Image (tube, rainbow, N blue to C red):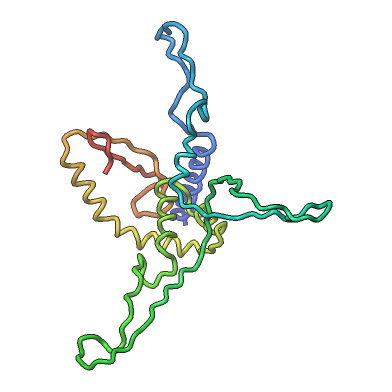
Amino acid sequence: MRVTLRNEIELLQAKVRDLRQRVFGAHTEQSSTVNPGVAVQGAPPPRRTRGQQSGRRGQLRRLAGQLPQRVETAGVAQPVCPGCGVALGAMSGVESREVVEVEVRAYRRSIQRPRGRMRCSCGRLPGIVSAPPAPQLIRRGKLGVPVWVQALLGKYLYGQPTHGLLHDLREQGLQVAQGTLTGGLKRLAPLFTPLAQAGLERLRSHHHWHADETRWEVYVEREGKVGHGWYRWVCADASGRAP
């Protein structure tokens, strides 16, 4: 009974520490203070204003030319004069304006595989022939590769919590249970083992390393482990590249 209560207290204390760190902890290592021991020589250089610079082509316009184009035609609602009813005369050319947009939505991908029946008797092929099934990350899984790519990037690159990922998928029209997402991530983890091993081998081949750690709260009961505070280490070689 005492052991159970002590574990519950440690779990609650760990959650409180995590919430305090998120709300009141430092969110950046940058500082705008000036070292008082360093003298400032002359006036500070003029600061470059943010945003588009005068006389230079916008970055968005340069990148927009590489995107696929979807042409839409917007006609005049009443192609006649509202006073006398005479139709408007046709003109050459159009007025064009481009807007860069992103369309994110869930959809069903239906893969149809037509079948063919063999008419020969040589026995080289089976009686019924069809295209091979589409590759899947998870056997008999209903979620396609783009969904898992979004989940992996959101969780491990952008640090997005699981409930945030589920919320984003719901906004895109896809209702996914939390067990489906967490179970799928566990099944995908072994696929990254060869990549992690290759990174470690490359890192160990160098003679100089850089290492840093950050606190990592893991709310999993582990025998012999007191509390839920762990540390995640990141190592890089002399070139600054992490495995």
Side of 97 where 1 appears, left or right: left
Closest to the observer, 65 or 45: 65
Taking 90 as reference, is 115 above or below it? below
Closest to the observer, 140 or 161: 140
Side of 99 where 6 appears, left or right: left
Closest to the observer, 28 or 13: 28
Q: Position of residue 72 (x, y in %)?
A: 58, 55
Q: Residue at x 45, y 65 (%)?
A: 180
Side of 105 where 193 appears, left or right: left
Q: Quadrant of the C terminus?
A: top left
Q: Position of residue 101 (x, y in %)?
A: 54, 49
Q: Residue at x 61, y 46 (%)?
A: 95
Q: Residue at x 47, y 18 (%)?
A: 33
Side of 80 where 190 appears, left or right: left
Closest to the observer, 59 or 217: 59
Q: Position of residue 163 (x, y in %)?
A: 52, 54
Q: Position of residue 37 (x, y in %)?
A: 40, 9
